[in-house]
Image (cartoon, rainbow, N blue to C red):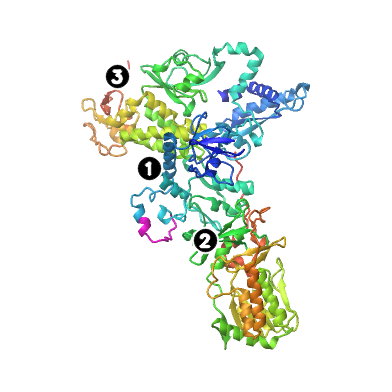
Amino acid sequence: MDRSILEGNPHLVIEGMVIAAIAIGATEGFIFVRTEYPLARKHTEVALQHARNHGLLGKNILASGIDFDIEIVRGAGAYVCGEETALIASIEGRRGMPRPRPPYPVEKGLWGRPTCINNVETLANVPIIIEQGSEAYAAIGVEGNSGTKIFSLVGKIRNTGLVEVPLGIPIRKVVYDIGGGPLEGQKIKAVQTGGPSGGCIPEELFDLPVTFDSLTEAGSIMGSGGMIVIDEETCVVDLAKYFLTFTQEESCGQCPPCRVGSRAMLVLLDRITEGTATMADLDKLEQLAGTVREASLCGLGKNAPNPVITTLRYFREEYVEHIEKKQCRAFTCKQLITYTIDEERCNGCGACFRVCNDDAIIGEPKQLHVIDQDRCVHCGNCFVVCPPSLAAVVRTSGELTRYEEPVVKAKKG
Amino acid sequence: MKITVNDQVLDANEGESVLEVALRHDIEIPHICYHPILPANGVCRMCLVEIDGINGLPASCSTPAADGMVVHTETETVRNRRRENLELILLEHPSSCLVCYKREACQTFRPEKEKTGVTTGCQNCPNKHDCEVQRLTLDLGITDLPVGSFYRNAEFDRDDPFIENDPNLCILCGRCEQICQYHHDTPVVVLTGRGPDARVGQAFDLPLNASGCTFCGACVDLCPTGSLSDRFARWYGVADGLVKTTCPFCDAGCALEVKSEGHRVFSATALDQTKPLCALGRFTIPPFLSSRDRLTHPRVMAGERLREVTWEEAFTAVADGLAPFKGDTFALVCDRSGTVEDRHALRVFTEEVMDSSHYIEIEDGEEPRVELPTGVKAVLLTGDFLEADALDALEMVVVLDCYPSPAAEKATAILPAAILLETKGHLVDENGVERPAKRAVRPAGQAKQDHEIITGLITAMGDEGTAGKLTGEIETRIQDSEAELITERAEAPAPALDVTKIRTRYRGHLIAARVPDAGAVQPVAAPVPSEVV
């Protein structure tokens, strides 16, 4: 994605910026790079120096009479600086906080001047369009969504990494053909697109083409171009909680819907994953998600509830199971899992007994162990250490009980 | 330009926001972060409205009115979102009292003042009588919150002079940062931290005086909660007295809005909020007026001790004592802090009644210590102006002052003077224009204004004609006055970053000695933050 372009081919961005500058008559450009990406910064710095040495940047570019130079600005590690007005504030030396629009940056941007602000990937596409012509570029992809897009394909699939695909390609093709499909013995459940502010798209909708509009319609966003594939081993409530934890920590703290709203949503999600929620909490969660989405000041807040909204839309029954049956079908939410020891499998080896930090396992060596449910904190240590050949620790969540198959090792010789 | 708000067609001006148009026409849209003198910030999200043709719910404060715009402020969605938004604000604000079902009874039967440091609800909040959050909550009828409250449990910052910062009350409306930016270009009070840790403070958590704060107090004035508070004023309740007058400390002539409760002045704020006050005008007047060391009763030397007497006895004693010193053996020393009328009375007393040419008026900015002309044996001092050895050479010292001084210890008589906001008359600003000084509070104890004391003295000396003439003159002058306050200042007064640069002494008394915070305002060098790697 953006980082890979700056690390791998910063010249593309520089060229795109020069073209954009000529188009709008700008004399100064800025590349805003996160401090956490030192390599991207270093490579871009080198590329800028090369461009200057060749007369492609600076005063009187290639004797054309055009002046344009680019400066690199280090961001101070704030997710919210991806929001254009916050990014501008950060470059100006102020706290990276979004401000309400209008005025839009094109009217009043950096230091109050009209500013063209674009994504690295967008600018990197400019030289290609100029070079090959708009028709050739528009031939890639589908109507209204032409060109290619780089995705970071990760999660529970065989092949992970950065992939560049033409827009309009079905999600299924990306996940199954390029990603190689699910890991052994698993089934793909959904894909989270657009990073932490994006949404979760279920497997049923995998025939959806990857375009800006279709993703928005499905409740997600193209966003940063992340694609996180999840399988049946992942709990969607936990997933939503994970992303929301991130966004609420990254909230700039200005507006209450984002700062407090996402935190309140998190409290409700915590209740659900801990099994203390009621159905009223689910309604509250939905309502709060709506408020955060509609009342927030900037894109960070408006999109923060996306993971919750989409998982509620497509996997509502999982939420209801958590609340009503205290059941986590992916066996992820610890508080909803009960560990018991199968008396027929346990040989009293004492492994679980030794790792239990809460003295919840009663038993003597060579005798059957029993878990005292009142003391158990559901840490799962006993399940982990129980020898695979025995697999005596059984997990129960709500109505589901999961036995692991004992692995019988072939004896040596 | 016309816009439609809730089916009402309103005229709008160029550059006005939707909220401003609505408020101008008495259509109430709840708002917190909006303030008339500040640029729209749009962060509190209370003023959300629906506008035809605009997606979502735009904030009316940051949306410029456009011709033909159709705005709805009371639709179901808007109401719900507004309500939920306020509920979220209340989650971080001690709101137990607001959502408590016993609130009304509690407000009726609880005693008024509660001097507690930590605020856990409206009951013990410095702002309980005048709180925008409280008002909005009652207006919208919020009685329950979606989840348990998020009390910040942050440390109460009391280390800075004059201003206290209780982050637990803050709703992060950002007005403080905005007004600081507006007045001083680079804000000192800023939003720090992120997400749940966001709060109002100073960059790198430096104290205010190391961050370049001028202590203009504008942030305190605009804070809608009790988060940023005036250390002195926070213990008072609702003002029962409100007077607009001129700041008596220097000749900048800033107009003040003075609040008092039960004959005690507790706060002085700028009348023209677009220009900040200096630290002296904003914060030092109430504590300087209310110090316990004030001279409050006339006292006369009886044998070895000063004895409390009535004004009549004091006047007679002073008149009798001064009688032998008519002519150039008498001198009067005053400074320019009093009203025009007071100084006129002092001059008349010296030159016409005492027949002396030694009317000594210390210029502002001078070291308030004078050497008396030779031959002077009796002196009337209106402040701490003489060195100890000069006092020893005198036969009679009369002190007309507000605070004890070395002179007061050796005085034949002490006449307590009304000062600052206890006086009325006129003050002259730097351009020579007279500005009205209104009495905001009755004088401490039995103190009287200088000209009242002087006329009393003249009467006691048997010259009732001059006394009557002087009183008449002054009263007509005050009554017929057409002097006006400066309601819009051309420029802000010099920031009192360093109080020593403006005025350290009032009537010769060190202000910092009476108001310790004033001495602590001197800027501290900011430690250089370690290089961010």
- Mark 2 neighbour density, 10 Å: few (under 14) some (14–19) many (20 or more): some
Magenta residues span: B106-118
Q: Mark number for residue A311?
A: none
Note whether residue A57 is visible: yes
Q: Chain of mark 3?
A: A
Image vertical order of residue B276 relative to residue B468, above or below: above
Most foreground residue, B181 or B133: B133
- According to the picture, the residue beneath numbered tag 3 turns out to be A408
Image quarter where the C terminus of chain A lies is: top left
- Residue at mark 1: B145
Quarter holding the N terminus of chain A is top right
Q: Quadrant of residue B515?
A: bottom right
Q: Position of residue A284 (x, y in %)?
A: 36, 35
Residue type at mark 2: give it: Phe
Distance between the alpha carbons at the discs numbered 2 and 3: 78 Å
Residue B230: where, in percent of width, then height? 53, 57
Q: Chain of mark 1?
A: B
Please give left or right for residue A307 compared with residue A116 in the image. Answer: left
Q: Respond whether the residues carrying marks 1 and 2 are from the same subunit.
A: yes
Distance from disc 1 to disc 2, alpha carbons, whole Å, reads 33 Å
Distance from disc 3 to disc 1, alpha carbons, whole Å, reads 55 Å
Q: Is residue B192 visible?
A: no
Question: Disc 1, disc 2: CB below 8 Å?
Answer: no
Amino acid type of the residue tagged 3 in the rendering: Val
User: Is label 2 or label 3 in front?
Assistant: 2
Mark sitting on residue B232: 2
User: Who is closer to the viewer here, A237 or A295?
Assistant: A295
